[in-house]
Image (spheres, rainbow, N blue to C red):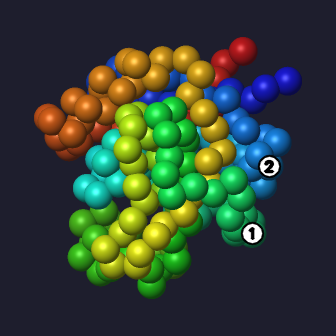
Amino acid sequence: MSRLMTISLERRGVSCVAELLDKDAPRTCEAVWRALPLGGDAYHAKYARNELYTMVERFADEEVGLENPTVTPIPGDVVYFSFAGGMLDRAFKEEKGIGALPGVIDLAVFYGRNNLLLNGDVGWVPGNVYATIVDGLDRMAEACNDVWRSGAVGERLVYRRAES
């Protein structure tokens, strides 16, 4: 039986449903599933292109490592990134309010094409594709694009287990 989660932009009142890719990323899926609900302030990526993400404290007992990695996510990919404390620059951490954390998890939704996970500070940044959006990508893409145009202030990106 497939495990589903709802991903929502709370202020905009838009949600989509994603199916966990348990066969492709079992460690990541299990860690995220156990930790749900997860969420925080929404941010639109500066460089990756069509990405909306939130950053949360580390939640897994052990780091899951890379599995089902990509540096070229496609529309509908839901991706997990783990950043050690020293990997992110000071100004970025202060801006996001995560400066005191030893590391963070970045939970991202990719809603359009031509994404490339290349960071000017560290180079290639592979992430684990652990879910795919199976319902509502069009609505979510429109809302994510509105975050890009109108701003993310006050918006929260939240991941929850889908109700059966």
Quadrant assignment for the N terminus: top right
In the rendered image, the vertical position of residue 4 relative to residue 118, given as above or below: above
Q: Using the image, determine if residue 22 lies above or below residue 19.
A: below
The residue positioned 56% from the left and 28% from the top of the image is: 133
* Residue occupying image coordinates x 55% and y 17%: 135
Q: Badge 2 local density, few (<14 within 10 Å), some, or many (20+)?
A: some
Image quadrant assignment for residue 121: bottom left
* Residue holding disc 2: 26
**Is 70 on the left-hand or right-hand side of 2?**
left
Q: Quadrant of the C terminus?
A: top right
The amino acid sitting under disc 1 is Glu
- Where is residue 126 drawn, in percent x and y? 54, 63
Give whichever of discs 2 and 1 has the lower sequence position: 2
In the picture, measured across the screen, residue 129 lies left or right of residue 84, that is right
Residue drawn 48% across the image and 18% down it: 136
Residue furthest left as drawn: 150
Q: Measuring 69% from the left and 53% from the top, which residue is drawn there?
A: 68
Residue farthest along the right direction in this orientation: 1
Q: Badge 1, how many Cα within 10 Å: few under 14, some, many 20+? A: few
- Residue at the front extreme, as displayed: 114
Q: Secondary structure at mark 2?
A: helix
What residue did someone put label 1 on? Answer: 62
User: Can residue 149 be seen from the camera position used here?
Assistant: yes
Residue type, numbered disc 2: Pro
Q: Is residue 15 visible?
A: no
Does residue 28 appear to the left or right of 128 in the view shown? right
Q: Position of residue 113 (x, y in %)?
A: 39, 38
To which quarter of the image does residue 42 belong?
top left
Q: Is residue 88 left or right of residue 107?
A: left
Of circles 2 and 1, the one toward us is 2
Q: Secondary structure at mark 1?
A: loop
Instruction: Give the spatial CA distance, label 2 vs label 1.
Output: 14 Å
